[in-house]
Image: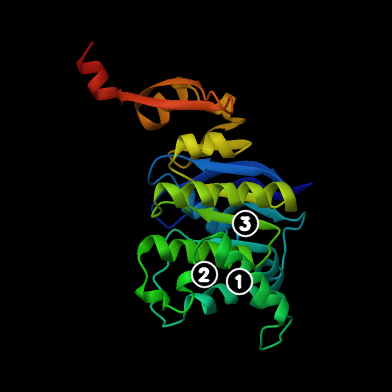
C-alpha cells in the first residue's frame, strides 16, 4: 500500500525552482532515505509531505488521499525537524508527552497508558535520567533525542526525520537507528529519513532517493543508487565502494573530491 505518493511536484520560494517535477512513492513498511548535498531541497520536501507548505505544481497523496485533515496528519504522521528553536521552559517529560496529545481525543490530561508509553520510550532513547530537566537547558544532542522520543511517543503510521542524528555521538546514533529499524520491523512503521550519512542510509534503508539541484537524480535500492558514478555527479567526490562484511550492504570510503583527483592526474 502506498502511504506517500508524489506526482510531478514542483515548489518555489519565488526565485527559481527549489524542487522540480518530483515523483516517487513510499509504501507502508518502507524505510526510505532522502540523500543529496546541502541546498538540494530535502528539508523543503519533508515540509511538503506533512503539508506545512503546498506544492505549486503536482500533487501529494497521503494514505491514498490528496485531501487530508490536519487532525489526521497530527495523529498519523510524526515529524522530527532538523532544528527546534523552542525556548519554552517545558521539561523533557512534558515535551515527550506532547507526542501523545494527538491520540487523546481532546482529553486535557494524560492517562496511565500515556505515561507508561512515554516512560518506556525515554528509557529506549536514554533520556529518562534527565526527564525533569528543562528542554531549553539541554545540549544539542540531548534535545535531538527528546524530539525523536516525542515523535515515537505519538505512535504514528509514518515517521519523517530530518537529519535525526546530526547532533548525536556515535553511541546514540547507533541506538537511534537500531530503534527506528526495530519499530519499522515490528510495527510496520513507515520511515522517511533525510540524511547526509551515506553509510548509515545504505545500511538501514531499503530504498534511497538521491537528489541533485532540486530534482531526483536516482532512486531505488542501495545497491542501485550507491555507485561511484552517482557520487561523482551528485557530491563531486570519488569513492571506493565495497560490501559491508556483516550486512553485505554497500559501504563507501571517500578517496577525495573531483578537484583533488584531477590535480593528481
Assess disc 2: are there few (<14), some (14-19) or many (≥20) residues with their C-alpha within 10 Å of its C-alpha: some
Viewer-closest of 55 and 36: 36
Cβ atoms at labels 2 and 3 below 8 Å apart: no
Q: Report the front residue among 217 and 139.
A: 139
Outermost residue on the top side: it is: 265
Mark whose residue sits in front, 2 or 3 = 2
Marks 1 and 3, how far apart at CA: 20 Å
Task: Provide the secondary structure element on which disc 3 rests.
Answer: strand
Tell me which residue sits at (70%, 64%) in the image.
76
Query: Which residue is depicted at the point 65% across and 74% down?
Result: 100
Instruction: Give the quarter of the figure containing the C terminus.
Output: top left
Determine the secondary structure under disc 1: helix
Q: Residue 119's mark?
A: 1
Name the N-terminal-most of marks 2 and 3: 2
Instruction: Tell which residue pokes out farthest to the left in this image.
Output: 263
Q: Which residue position holds label 3? A: 159
On screen, residue 63 above or below 247: below
Q: Position of residue 103 (x, y in %)?
A: 71, 75
Q: Position of residue 29 (x, y in %)?
A: 72, 46
Q: Which residue is mark 2?
A: 128
Amino acid at each position: 500500500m502506498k502511504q506517500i505518493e508524489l506526482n510531478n511536484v514542483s515548489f518555489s520560494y519565488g526565485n527559481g525552482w527549489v524542487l522540480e517535477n518530483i515523483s516517487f512513492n513510499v509504501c507502508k513498511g518502507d524505510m526510505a532515505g532522502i540523500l543529496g548535498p546541502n541546498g538540494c531541497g530535502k528539508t523543503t520536501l519533508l515540509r511538503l509531505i506533512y503539508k506545512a507548505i503546498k506544492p505549486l505544481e503536482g500533487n501529494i497523496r497521503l494514505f491514498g488521499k490528496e485531501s487530508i485533515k490536519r487532525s489526521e496528519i497530527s495523529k498519523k504522521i510524526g515529524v522530527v525537524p532538523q532544528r527546534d528553536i523552542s525556548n519554552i521552559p517545558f521539561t523533557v517529560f512534558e515535551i515527550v508527552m506532547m507526542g501523545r496529545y494527538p491520540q487523546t481525543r481532546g482529553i486535557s490530561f494524560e492517562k496511565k497508558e500515556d505515561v507508561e508509553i512515554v516512560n518506556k520510550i525515554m528509557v529506549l532513547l536514554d533520556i529518562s535520567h534527565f526527564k525533569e530537566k528543562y528542554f531549553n537547558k539541554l545540549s544539542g544532542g540531548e534535545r535531538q533525542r527528546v524530539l525523536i522520543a516525542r515523535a515515537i511517543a505519538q505512535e504514528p503510521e509514518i515517521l519523517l526525520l530530518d537529519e535525526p542524528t546530526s547532533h548525536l555521538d556515535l553511541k546514540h546514533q547507533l541506538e537511534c537507528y537500531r530503534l527506528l529499524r526495530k519499530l519499522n520491523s515490528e510495527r510496520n512503521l513507515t520511515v522517511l529519513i533525510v540524511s547526509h550519512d551515506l553509510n548509515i542510509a545504505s545500511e538501514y534503508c531499503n530504498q534511497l532517493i538521491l537528489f541533485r539541484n532540486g530534482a531526483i537524480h536516482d532512486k531505488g535500492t542501495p545497491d542501485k543508487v550507491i555507485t561511484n558514478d552517482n557520487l561523482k555527479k551528485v557530491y563531486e567526490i570519488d569513492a571506493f565502494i565495497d560490501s559491508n562484511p556483516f550486512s553485505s550492504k554497500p559501504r563507501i570510503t571517500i578517496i577525495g573530491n573531483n578537484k583533488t583527483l584531477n590535480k593528481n592526474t
